[in-house]
Image (spheres, rainbow, N blue to C red):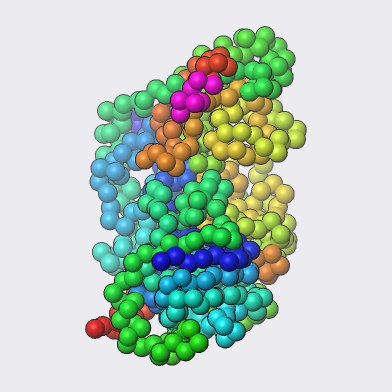
Amino acid sequence: MPISVIKPGVLTTVQDLGRYGYQRQGLVVSGALDAGALRAANLLVGNPENLAGLELTLRGPVLRFEADALLALTGADLAATIAGQPVPLGRPVAVRAGAVLTFGAPTTSGRAWLALAGGVAVPPVLGSRATYLRAAVGGLAGRALQAGDELPVGEWPAAGRRLIENSLPEPAAGWAAARWFLPTFLPASPGAPLVVRALPGPEYEQFGPASQRAFWAEAFTVTTEADRMGARLGGPSLARDMASELLSSAVTFGTVQVPAGGQPIVLLADCQTTGGYPRLAQVISADLGRLAQALPGTRLRFVQVGLAEAQALYLAQERRLRALARAVHLKSLP
Amino acid sequence: MADSTPPLRLYPLGDAAVVLELGQAIAPATHQLLQAFAQALAQHPLPGLREVVPAFTTLTVYYDPWVLSQASEIVPYEQVASYLLGLLPAAQAALADYVPGPLVEIPVCYGGDFGPDLGLVASHAQLAPAEVIARHAQPEYLVYMVGFAPGFPYLGGLDAGLATPRRPTPRPLVPAGAVGIAGAQTGIYSLPTPGGWQLIGRTPLRLFDPGRARPSLLQAGDRLRFVPISEAEFQRLRHAH
């Protein structure tokens, strides 16, 4: 049974963990800007972690559930409510048919993920349900949600039903949340600059010492030129020491490239597969999810780490998600 | 052959990708060795490798550090880098049996509304428009890589006499299928996008179609030839696809 979209929100798209295997054909990966947050939300409703959910931007949609649902919200606190009551983040929430989920003004930062038991069951395109807006690939007809849309929901995993039986109170006023929750993905304190760790990029040595120092020492501000493809940053101007043209080569989510004007661009999940601008830095995988909250006006700082540390942090994040999967599994045993 | 082999360099692109670079010069021999590497990698896959993206002089190999960490104590980057280095003999063997990619014919209706800049390219080259068309349709081009946009081919082989600077102001919207020249490059827009290339024609073929199992019409390594067609033929082919 579907979910009715009463209002679409600012930019709500269907996303999974991305469309891999087609970058050599120029097709971008897409997928949730904070893959860890979507994986966690999926695990919290008993789903496999790669099912499609919704990515919410700034102001979320208004959704009416036409059937009972089990959902989880992760990422930023976008002030979700059902029947006037705030819906907590980071935990399974059982919802009765007829309930309406709405979102208020953002109280912290900007993007959140909504997982549903069974996943958003739009047809996969080239192995993924992720929406790539620019080429209208995947998701719901290749576009963001619109009022009047109906979102298909897949068959519930058995774990979802057992989570409700084992650990959710009887839904009063149309919904109920588990008392346990996941602290890992709650947003950082509002107002503080977003700190992301990064490795020097392939062309790092071509930048002068002053540009290298400024990149790590100073704060940047996300400009209004920011979307799912990337975010142009305001701040110190950065310059390469040489004028020679670069040959196009691969770029990816987290690549910090610097066009001739000197204002860096940090690339996000919908970025092109190759580019010709110098790659000053590469944000580490464990911090890509933080970039999802880099919306216009956000202050951003880069902290240098080494490759061994970045890979250790990658593995630590994977271990946390695997621990969450085990914990949810224990709560959903018959 | 060893003398002409460009220097091989490996470096990280972040914590989940290795770049294999063969010098800094665009050349068919470099391209062929990269293709041979990609072929060797496809024949000898390493668990944990996600995908491979070829470019002019680089092959970027994306991997999952978690999968690699389960197999060995060695830092995942070092595992992938030494694996790629170890593939060099297999790549060189594959190079000996190198088979050129398929020849793909791209029908193009030149000039008129489809090629509004044909006259400008002709006057820049000091040639008649018909001669520009003939020289553009003459060479066998090589698809060095696909990137920038889904299905967008980077081509080598443009007649140097046709090189024309980009338009000073990009057009706000260039239709998919537009064939253009920018500097010493020629290419085909694969999606509607803003663009500053000098447009000399348009193909009715879809360079990118997510409904196909292989969404990009062209792949790195393909050879390409432009075939001039009439507007009537353009309309017929467009409706056939």
Q: In which quarter of the image is the N terminus of chain A?
A: bottom left
Q: Which of A115 and A328 is in front in this view?
A: A115
Say which quarter of the image contains residue B94. top left
Question: Which contiguous range is marked in magenta?
Answer: B235-241
The answer to whether residue B72 is above or below residue B211 is below
The answer to whether residue A115 is above or below residue A122 is below
User: Which x, y percent locates residue B102?
Assistant: 36, 25
Residue drawn at x 72%, y 49% is A261
Q: Is residue A128 left or right of residue B194?
A: left
Residue drawn at x 57%, y 83% is A83
Q: Nearer the viewer, residue B79 or B164?
A: B164
User: Which x, y percent locates residue B187?
Assistant: 56, 29
Residue drawn at x 50%, y 51% is A141
Is B239 covered by the magenta stretch? Answer: yes
Assign the magenta stretch its main secondary structure.
helix
The answer to whether residue A273 is above or below residue B159 is below
Q: Which of B124 and A22 is in front in this view?
A: A22
Q: Residue furthest right?
A: B168
Residue drawn at x 59%, y 61% is A147
Q: Quadrant of the C terminus of chain A?
A: bottom left
User: Which x, y percent locates residue B213?
Assistant: 36, 40
Q: Is residue A175 left or right of residue B87?
A: right
Is B198 covered by the magenta stretch? Answer: no
